[in-house]
Amino acid sequence: MSRKQKLLGDLQDTRLMYLKAALFLLAGSVAGMALLLESPNWQTGFLLAVRVWSFCRLYYFMFYVVEKYADSGYRFAGIFDFLTYLLRKKRGQIPSKPGSSALSPAPRR
């Protein structure tokens, strides 16, 4: 395995995973503060909060709800994989499983 493949592979070190999470938190916090400093009013703060909340819920839907309730047979590695899955499902390239819906929980393993 080349050095580039090792660098771009999946994170295996738990410390690096926490560092990555901390960097996402820092980047999001700095961006949010910059937006509020640029336009310091309640409307900007409210819209920013709604945006953050909405994207968190979308992320939860894509990577938890779909896997646990709608289609337990598929695992997604990222947003691109989820969008590819949706396109393939729309085209009929992924068969629907009987009893698979957002209202029926996935069978326990």
Image (spheres, helix red, strand yellow):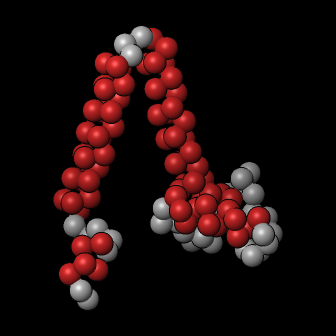
Count numbered badges in the picture.
0
Instruction: Estimate the x, y position of residue 34 in percent, counting from the top left.
Output: 31, 26
Q: Residue at x 24, y 46 (%)?
A: 22
Q: Is residue 83 left or right of residue 98?
A: left
Up-down relation of residue 96 to residue 56 (above or below): below
Residue located farthest toward the front when viewing the structure as drawn: 38
Up-down relation of residue 6 to residue 66 (above or below): below
Q: Residue at x 33, y 33 (%)?
A: 31
Quadrant position of residue 82: bottom right
Q: Residue at x 36, y 25 (%)?
A: 35
Instruction: Estimate the x, y position of residue 7 in percent, counting from the top left.
Output: 24, 73
- Residue 97: in sight, yes or no? no
In what quadrant of the picture does the N terminus appear? bottom left
- Residue 40: in sight, yes or no? yes
Residue located farthest toward the bottom when viewing the structure as drawn: 1
Up-down relation of residue 48 to residue 9 (above or below): above
